[in-house]
Amino acid sequence: MHLRVLGVGEGDFVLASSFTFIGSVSAILYQNAKPIFVDSDESWNISPLLLKEAIRLAPKKPKALIITHLYGQLCKLDEIIAICKEEGIYLIEDAAESLGASYHGIQSGTLGDMGVYSFNGNKILTTSGGGMLVSENEEWITKAKFLSTQAKEDTLHYEHKEFGYNYRMSNVLAAIGVAQMEVLAVRVDRRREIFALYQKHLCSIDEVQFMPEIQESRGNRWLSTLTLAKTNPLQVIDALEKENIESRPLWKPMHLQTLFVDSLVIEDGTSQKLFERGLCLPSGSSMSDEDVYRVCDTLKKALK
Ligand SMILES: Cc1ncc(COP(=O)(O)O)c(C=O)c1O
């Protein structure tokens, strides 16, 4: 819906991080627009260099860029914002995973033209489902509210000139979310502590490399994630599963999805390698230190 508010329509091009969850880019298809996927760099997030290349090679000027702050870690926003301003491309931050993370002390999702958040059950703060759109542009927000509530005209009777959606969040769920905002900082601190514990206990293993944090930022470590240089992550996922510990591979990049075989992509193999070598560890804010040690011990055994 955010792309519709920005005037993206059929045949338009929209740039997007390839290394993300499908929810980030489905909006492009809803508009019958065409994605141009951009690969990651050493930050695991979108590469500003490849982004420039994608803009240069695009068949027509892209209207918007959707970036994902992957696993709660921030993209290189200074460079990305500069590119979007110079090229006249709208910037949408997918902050679904990065609520409570910040860049130069500013909350993720509030640095682009629009920010989107998710309150799905697996997020740092949850209303069981639903999300939020933010922007400083009042006109866009008014239009988004209109579209998200079935596009009813401002008349006493039910008058419709265009189609809308039933995307509103109930006030009961919103109240549950607002109440949790009070503990957001505590949850971010705990997720960062859990990450620090993993790092401390696993950093001596040569083949383990954790997702980095760029200097200007403070990520929320929504998930603690790493890559393994030698061992097949699927073998480790299996070993953890046997101990009743859930873990997952990293997101499969969009340009490798069957759905997007015909889409344009600017890639250098980075996100594919991350997908093949990566692992998401249990990271819930309610994990105890002992829970984390148990994961570490099981993982160490699996790597021997
Ligand atoms: C990066 C990203 N974007 C979008 C979504 C979709 O959010 P929702 O499930 O609230 O639609 C998710 C997660 O679920 C996500 O991780």
Image (cartoon, grey):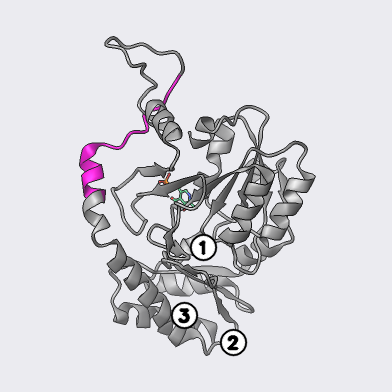
Q: Quadrant of the C terminus?
A: bottom right
- Percent x, y of residue 7: 57, 29
Disc number for residue 299: 3
Q: In the picture provided, is 258 more to the left or to the right than 156?
A: right
Between circles 3 and 1, the one closer to the viewer is 1
- Percent x, y of residue 210: 53, 76
Residue labelled with disc 1: 74
Disc number for residue 206: 2
Range of magenta residues: 163-177
- Percent x, y of residue 196: 41, 80
Residue at 54% x, 62% y: name it: 250
Q: Are marks 3 and 2 in contact (CB under 8 Å)?
A: no
User: Magenta stretch: residue 174 in it?
Assistant: yes
Residue at 51% x, 44% y: name it: 113
Secondary element type, mark 2? loop
Secondary element type, mark 1? loop
